[in-house]
Structures are given as C-alpha cells and as structure tokens.
Image (cartoon, rainbow, N blue to C red):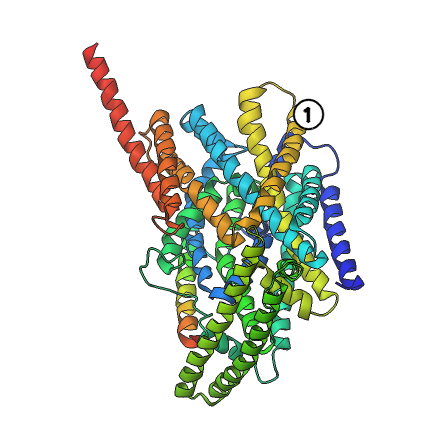
Amino acid sequence: MKNRNPDLPPFVKSWNQFYLLLIGWLILLIVAFYCFTWYFG
Amino acid sequence: MSILDWGVLIFTLTGIVSYGIYKSRGNQDIKEFLLGNQSLPWYHVCLSVMATQASAITFLSAPGLAYSSGMSFVQFYFGLPLAMIVLCITFVPIFHRLKVYTAYEFLEQRFNLKTRVLTAFLFLIQRGLSTGITIYAPSIILSTILNIDTTYTTIFIGGLVIFYTVYGGTKAVSYTQLLQMSIIFSGLFIAGAMVVYLLPDDVGFVKAISMAGKMGRTNAIDFSFDWDNQYTVWSGIIGGFFLQLSYFGTDQSQVGRYLTGSSVSESRLGLLMNGLVKIPMQFLILLIGVLVFTFYQYEKPPLFFNSYELNKLEKSGYSSELNQIKLEYNQAFSDKQKQVSELSKALNNEDTQAIDQSRSELRVADEKTKALRGKLTGLMQKNDPDAEINDNNYIFLSFVTQYLPKGLIGLLIAIIFLASMGSTASALNSLASTTVIDVYKRLINKEASDKNYLLASRLSTIGWGAVCIVMALYASKMGNLIEAVNKLGSYIYGTILGVFLVAFYLKRVGGRAVFYSAVCTEIIVCICGYYEVVAYLWLNVIGCLTVVILALLFELIIKKAAEDESTAV
C-alpha cells in the first residue's frame, strides 16, 4: 500500500479502469444471484 | 443472559466508549471535531462509510426480512456501485477543492443562501427522524433481554450514544468504526457458522438453503417490471442508484465521513471499495436470515418473536384465547414436521416430483401457521391498539438469545450495539455540523471564536440527541424499521439530489429557479408518497427528475420575464 502512487487506484492504471472494474463486479453479482435464485428456487 | 454474556457485553461497550474518549483527548478545534483535520487513509474512509450505513437496523431487520419474505431486499443495493462512481467523478473532487465542512456550503457558492438553508433544513428533518429510528433498534435488544418497555431502553441507549458522541468528535468516530467493522465481520461469520452447526446432522449448508429456496426464501433476483413491487432489479438499479447517490452525495452524515480522507484519491478509493464490498455483505446478512428460517423448520419457533408483547397478552383478559391459539399452533407445527421430513427426503433423492408435492404441502402448512399468527396479532391489537404487531426485528435476536452458546450471545449483542453506536455517532456529528456551520455560524453568530463554535457543536449534539430519543419513542409504530428509514429518506433525498445535480451539470440555472423547483418538488413527492402512487424507491427518481425539469422551466420563465421587463423599459 505504501508503494502505491497516491493519485492512482491500486491494481489498475487509471480511475476509469477502476470504475469499469466496479461495473463488471456489479454485473457478475447480478448474474451470480440470478443463478442462485434459479438453482435453489 | 448469563453472567459471562453480561461481562462480554459490558467489557466491549465500556472498551469502545473509553476508546472514543481516549481518541478525542487533548485540545480540539472545530476542524478537528467536525472533519478530523482531513488526515485519514482510504481504508478508514471505506470502513467509516460502511459503519455509518450499516447500523444495528442492518443486523436486526435484514435477517428478519429474509426469514419472513426472502432475499429480494439485496436488490435495493444494486444502484450503490454506480452511485459511488458518479460521486467519485463529480462530488468528491468539488467538495475537496472548495474545502467545505458541509455539502450545503457548496450550494450557497453555486446558488444562494436560500437554497443552502432549504437543503440543510430538509437534511436536518430527515436525519433527525431517521437517527431516532437508528437509536430505537438496539433498544429493542435490551427490552427483550430485560423484558421491560422499549421506552426505558431507548432513553438509556440514546443517552449512552450522546455521551460518547459529544466527547468523541469525528476522528474518534472514524477510529472506533474501524474497530467496530472488524468485530462485526468476525461476528457475522461466527453467527452464520453457528446456525449451520445447530441444524440437524443430515442438513448441511447447501441443503439448508435448498429447503428455504423451496419455500420461496432464496428469491434474490426479480427481473419483473412491477411498479408496485418494492424490490426488483430495476427498482434497485434505478431507484437505488438515485437513493444511494442522494444519500452519499448530499447527506452530511456520509459527506462528513469521506471528507475526512487525506486527499481526493483516498476519499475516492474508500467509496469505491465500499461499492465492491457492500452488496456481498448484505447478501451474507440476508443468507443468515434464510439459514435461521431453515433452522426453525426443525425447531419450533416462538408463536410471536417479541416476547414482551406476548407476555402482555398473557397477562390480559385474552389469555384463554391465547392459550387456544397456542394449542392450535403446536398442533400445526407438529403436522408440518411430516412435510418437512418428506421434503428433506425428496431433496436427498433428488426426486423432482416428490419435491414439488412436498413443497406445495409445506406451503399450505406455512399458510396455516401464518393465519394463526394473524389471529394472534388481531388479539394483540384488540387488547392494546398500540401493540407492536410486527416482530420481524425480533427474529434474529430471539434466535441468538435462545440458541447460541454463553459468551457468544454477549458478543453478538455487543456487535449490534457497536454498529448502532457508530452510525448514530456519525449522524449526531453531522446534525451538529450542519446546525453549527449552515445555521449558527452562517445566520446567527458569524464572527464568534473557534472555542465558541466548538461549544456550539457539542451543545447541538446534545440537543439533536434529545430530539432523536423522542423520535425513537415513536419508532415502534412504524412497522419494519429498515423500510421505515429508507421510506423516510425517499421523501427527501430525491429533491436534495436534484438540487445538487442542477448545481453540477446545469450551469445556466440560477438560484431562484432551483429554489422554487425544490419547494414545488417536495410538495409533489409528499403527495405521491402519501397516496402511494408508486413503490417508495421510485420517489427518489421522481423527486430528482422533477427538480431538474422544473428548474429548467422556471429558469426559462424567469429569463423571459426579465427580457420582457427590459424590453418594456
């Protein structure tokens, strides 16, 4: 954490990439919950 | 509760209060008291905004909601990651650059004093009322444990939080929240593991969820376009987005948290990490409720989870009717055991036809139990029209106190206290900062000393604490607490968000237009909410869009009038 560039997010090269990562995570969660609902219901 | 549980509870509570006082020691000025000198790293910001949002209500109501109606509530948070992105692009850099104490200060710079005061006023009403509900939630715990009226427990809890917040200041609030969230995550994991451990030997984790699923409790996703359905993917993404954007962007209790970040990047990262973690966390909390539901398919649940109300009925003139309902309930539960065992067998054999049949029978048995509970609540209301007939908030609590081992009960109850103390402390701190910065310093006493403002902040915290306690005393009449808080927010957040969006994105719109549009919108939203025109999450969208549209319209009218006037001259 100490080596991180203080103006950039960790793991990715820009803030825009981090925003896309978050949108991807949301889509993944919705798909996972859909599978959960379908499988157990 | 055993002596060990009381020991754990008292040790944890005194520990956290002492820690708050320790962190706030020494001379403080107004900037340190309200903004913590803007020195905190991203993980502090992340856990602080999470702790502020995740109050005791989260841990009491959410499992109860999953137990009684399934997991659809998780969809409510789908708009949160998107809201975090918009916040990080627009709100955070502007608030940091202008070095504001409160979000509403920005509105005076952009529009005028009237708009700043109006939005601050709306915030104070909304936050003052909802913090009352936040204080009420943990007071339920003491009420159930000590079997006394929630009035006394509400006053006790409220007093404790006021004491802690007045001495704490925002920096101590953030430090304690860091500790609180670590304990909360550990406690949740232990609680989930304990429910699975307490299930019968032949029912594992997956089978427990399967059983709950067959009874309609794993409905995490609903893609339907039903406007009256509170929780669908669409209401979550669209309505939830507007609600979360308003909450995090314009509610001082959250703005105050991420303004403590040492830079724009630290505040941004804290918010985005919150967007990553919040939905899975909420899902796991609901899953615990689902597991508790399966547990109570094998163990007989109380006829009514709020033992205080049940005891009240037992002592009334309706005790013979109550005994009759109890007998019928016992019979219904023992009849239901046959269907539960058949469903269990069918699941083991993966026999689809048998699963469908036993599921239908089980649902009929479930309806019978529900009808008996309906009869009971009718009796409660007959006995006392003010009786609290919604016991959702007592379900998880009842399970914890009856089935978890000694020591762990105290720890889990302490966790609920800590969560409540963290979010209530943030709220009281934000109410104080808005009162002092946007009202006292701006309108009443502009040139006072720093010491005077600090004293005003502390007195304001005490005053708001007292108001919140009074509000908390009425919270028991508001049904499910978590929904009550969100409904209240939906009446106001949309309007405030609309004002901020106009401020950020419609540079041509002036102060007069936005002020009148905000007033008109609030009236429209209240009418829509009162007549239940749409599900409450949509009120955020309606409020926000109406402000934007009316502001554009009013600006046109004002400009036209000005042009006509100049032409006439």
Label 1: chain?
B
Looking at the picture, tell me which residue is in the foreground, B149 or B164. Answer: B149
- The picture quadrant where one finds residue B382 is bottom right
Rendered residue at 45%/83% (across/down): B358
- The picture quadrant where one finds residue B523 is top left
Q: Is residue B205 something that shows in the picture?
A: no
Q: Position of residue B114 (x, y in %)?
A: 43, 25
Q: Is residue B457 above or below residue B164?
A: above
Q: Is residue B471 above or below residue B564?
A: below
Looking at the picture, tell me which residue is in the foreground, A28 or A16. Answer: A28
Q: Position of residue B468 (x, y in %)?
A: 60, 40
Left or right: where B439 falls relative to B449: left
Where the C terminus of chain B falls, by quadrant?
top left
Left or right: where B516 falls relative to B339: left
Q: Which residue is mark 1?
A: B451
Left or right: where B408 falls relative to B439: right
Where the N terminus of chain B falls, by quadrant?
bottom right
Q: Is residue B499 something that shows in the picture?
A: yes
Looking at the picture, tell me which residue is in the foreground, B118 or B454. Answer: B118
Q: Amino acid at mark 1?
A: Lys
What is the crowding at mark 1: few (fewer than 14 residues within 10 Å), some, or many (at least 20)? few
Q: Which residue appears farthest toward the top when viewing the image? A: B569
